[in-house]
Image (tube, rainbow, N blue to C red):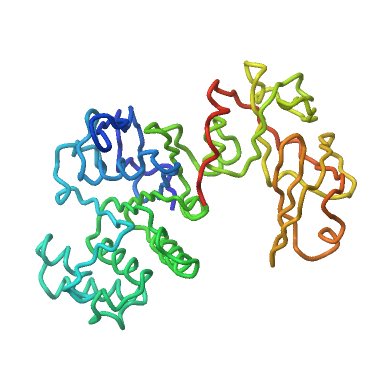
Amino acid sequence: MYFPSAPVTLELSDISFKYSIGDRHARAFSLAQCNISARAGETMGILGPSGAGKSTLLSIIAGHLRPTTGAVRLRGRDITQVRAGLRRIVTVFQEDSLFPHLTVEQNVAYGIATLQRHSEIVASTRAEHYLRRFGLFNHRTSSPAALSVGEKQRVALCRALVAEPQVLLLDEPTASLDCIQRDVLMDLLRETLQCEKGPTIIIVSHDRDFALDLCPTIAVLDEGKVLCQGEREDLLAVPPSRRVAQILGGHFILDGQLESESMFRLSDGVPIPIKLSGRHAPAERNCSILIRKSEISLDNREHTSPCQITGRIVRITPSPLCSLVEVEIGRQIRIQIPSTGAQHAAYAAGDTISLWLSETAVQVVGRSPQSADIPEVALN
């Protein structure tokens, strides 16, 4: 859930961290001046490519790593030097972290029975509640070895929630799950998010769709730096930079020159008619345009939009629900169309077609000198 008026539960101020990977000649990895805040009951997703520092940041929040500089605050209290077990912050890791010698029920009750020293009755009652809620009660006497990967992940989530943490950290929760297990976990997390007394949840994931679906607030991390933090809808509608648009997806990114508020020319000279509002105008002429994928259409119907791009279909890749149409417009872009119906039947490879943009589809952003060297983000 998202509570914009709720007090801040977790705050990271100017967090930096440095360590070397491998021998002394290896490239040093670092986090630099990271600032993030999350409100009570809020669910935040931290997105970024591999090696961005997401798991390192989670380890600092949990207390498994100490930052080189900066502070971690929980409900206003500086907990930077507080050890992990005393923070009321619980992490669910992507790898199997269950105790193999304990039953499912004993695993779930372990934290509150052993670490928080609740009575056996209290621990058993709480464990039973979550086991029933997560559909695991019939497995309560099983060993972890008898469970599927998805069931183990649900047991780990039960164990975390039984402890009633103030902050719950999920590190790549879908990394080892198939699509069915992923959907089950998503439904369980949605149910957890509906609880008014639920914890603040921070999710780190390579699964962009999973994180964007569950998290009303998003922080984007790249090369150890927080590029932005904000409400999901705002960042998806108007990404603050070219790199953020790459990481979040949802936009075609074209490099070139802005000739006027109605014309953009790609780097290879192909003209792209556009329509900009004043707030989208960049300071520099060499820039990039972001075109929202949801506001570009491929069809032969009449349109009122003045923004039309002519392209050529390179290939059509069919699938049961949507076909992927690759169109050359000076660079190749991919557009999904329904796999059935008149629209699909109307097109073939080699056809010249028109792409129509809505008047709000285009945003212009600055282009750093190194932007051509930055790879596309490898996110699912």
Q: Position of residue 194 (x, y in %)?
A: 42, 60
Residue pictured at 45% horizontal, 44% vertical: 217
Q: Is residue 328 left or right of residue 123?
A: right
Q: Give the percent coordinates (x, y) of residue 121.
A: 14, 75
Residue 153 lies in quadrant: bottom left
Judge by depth and name the residue closer to the eye, 212 or 309.
Answer: 309
Front in this rendered view, residue 327 or 211? 327
Q: Is residue 191 above or below residue 70?
A: below
Tally of marks:
0
Q: Position of residue 38 (x, y in %)?
A: 36, 42
Q: Quadrant of residue 65?
A: top left
Instruction: Specify the quadrant of the image occupied by residue 303.
Output: top right
**In this picture, residue 48 sits left or right of residue 129:** right
Compared with residue 264, is residue 128 higher up or lower down, i.e. above or below? below
328 to the left or right of 22: right
Report the front residue among 191 and 84: 84
Q: In the rendered image of this protein, does residue 43 appear above or below residue 161?
A: above
In the image, residue 316 above or below residue 6: below
Q: Residue at x 64, y 35 (%)?
A: 253
Q: What residue do we see at 46% from left, 65% from top?
A: 182
Towards the viewer: 40 or 176: 176
The percent coordinates of residue 57 (x first, y second) are 31, 40
